[in-house]
Amino acid sequence: MGTPIRVVADGDLAPYHLLKDSGDDSRLNQLGYKQELSRSLSALSNFSVTFSIISVLTGINTLYNQGLTFGGPVAMVYGWPIVGLFTFLVGLSLAEICSAYPTSGGLYFWSAKLCGNRWGPFASWLTGW
């Protein structure tokens, strides 16, 4: 049986490999781990954890006065949505990395893997520090 071929942009052909099990368990096994994390959060629990981590109330109280003082209403009206969009894009990229390396303590592991063998331990240490 040959390698499957798919059509990509401009009619080019690209080979790809089918995975028998595309779940996180197989990826964790490839990384040398076994799945131990229980992934059972309700929608309310997920919202509660997210809301407490981003700390909306303390962030607004601290930065609202500074934004109005130094940037004025224009900075507040246009600044918050623009910065929010960029923050969302950073979150999307972190979610992509998280799906590629689904481990607990992921930030340390991600930084070590993404920096390579030479700088990986130092980058992991900086992330934890």
Image (cartoon, rainbow, N blue to C red):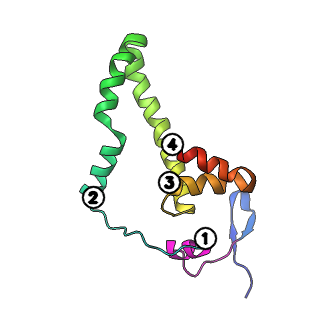
CB atoms at circles 1 and 2 under 8 Å apart?
no
Res 43 label: 2
From the image, state whether disc 3 or disc 1 is nearer to you: 1
* Gap in angstroms between the C-alphas marked 1 and 2: 29 Å
Residue count near mark 2 (Cα–Cα under 10 Å), binned few <14, some 14–19, many ≥20: few
Residue ID at (50%, 71%) = 24
Residue ID at (52%, 57%) = 106
* Gap in angstroms between the C-alphas marked 2 and 3: 18 Å
Residue labelled with disc 4:
89
CB atoms at circles 2 and 3 under 8 Å apart?
no
Q: Is disc 2 placed on a helix, strand or loop? A: helix
Residue labelled with disc 3:
95
Res 31 label: 1
* Gap in angstroms between the C-alphas marked 4 and 1: 27 Å
Residue closer to the observer: 119 or 26: 119
Q: Earlier in the sequence, mark 4 or mark 1?
A: 1
Does residue 129 appear to the left or right of 77 in the view shown? right
Q: Earlier in the sequence, mark 3 or mark 1?
A: 1
Magenta residue span: 16-31
